[in-house]
Image: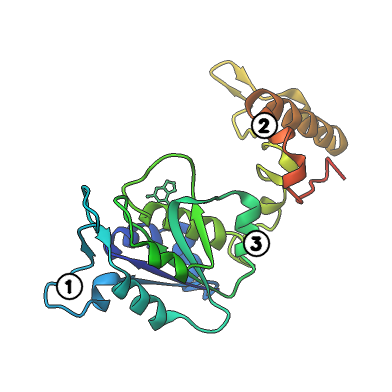
Amino acid sequence: MRIDIITIFPKMFEPVLGESILKRAQAAGKVKILVHDLRDHTLDKHRKVDDRPFGGGSGMVLCPEPVFKAVAAVKKSGSKVILLTPQGRKLDQSMAKRLAKQKHLIFVCGRYEGFDERIRALADEEVSIGDYILTGGELAAMVLTDVVSRLLPGVLGDKNSLNFESFEGNLLEYPQYTRPANFRSMEVPRVLLSGDHQKIECWRAQQALKRTREKRPDLLNNNNKKKGKSKWTK
Ligand code: 6GU
């Protein structure tokens, strides 16, 4: 997959793209991520990307011209243009899975004060990462890059780690333990040390359900939305 990110703060992305799984995925050629400075697509010597709003009001508004140019410079047939804005559809795991099937994503980072409404015409989709306001779309673009990239074939080493994670089949993940079996008098549940794989599976299923009921009952009342099935709900 290829991801192009259009932003006025390209440096914000360096530390995130340059570490850990995103770094490895790029090095292995599983995903190609290019960050573009919106100011490179301005025509004036001040490299101006925003202006005062028509009709008055506080703050500055992102101008359409540089954004249209920047998108045109990377767009090919089959590209999907996504505008990061708090007005977008809220990101969830099923949206991530759908986007992970695309060949080419273009993320346009909006600014908190707003962008010219005509920029919306460029977007195939508008995406938000939650009901709160960020100072800009950059952190949202990083979140989207991360959730999509880790779903690409070969990005996560262990195939199973995708199968049983949270939100599969609308359930939170079961509790996990590692050594030591007794840590400061806190014991690992005995069943996990039993070696009885059927029992362990059963315990994990019960725990996942219990946890979800306790922490995120909304996920259980939300079955209509998700298509993902876990082995527990088959
Ligand atoms: Cl995509 N942008 C901004 N500015 N705030 C947000 C957001 C995006 N998603 C949630 N809050």
Instruction: Work out whether mark 3 precedes mark 2 in sequence or the reverse, and give the earlier one.
Output: 3
Tag 3 residue: 98
- Inter-mark Cα distance, 3 to 1: 36 Å
Q: Are marks 3 and 2 in contact (CB under 8 Å)?
A: no
**Circles 1 and 2: CB distance less than 8 Å?**
no
Badge 1 amino acid? Arg
Measure the alpha-carbon separation of dots 1 and 2: 47 Å
For the question of whether residue 193 can be seen, the reply is no
Label 3, label 2: how far apart the Cα atoms are = 22 Å
Q: Nearer the viewer, residue 177 or 55?
A: 55
The answer to whether residue 201 is above or below residue 44 is: above
- The residue wearing badge 1 is 47
| Residue indicated by mark 2 | 218
Kind of residue at disc 2: Asp
Residue 169: image tag: none
Would residue 111 appear left or right of 191 to someone viewing this image?
left
* Above or below 154: residue 97: above
The residue under the point 24% across, 59% down is 54
Q: Which residue sits at x=58%, y=75%? A: 103
Q: Please identify, in this view, whether the residue under mark 3 or under mark 1 is nearer the observer.
A: 1
Say what secondary structure mark 3 lies in: helix
Where residue 128 sits: x, y (%)?
48, 50
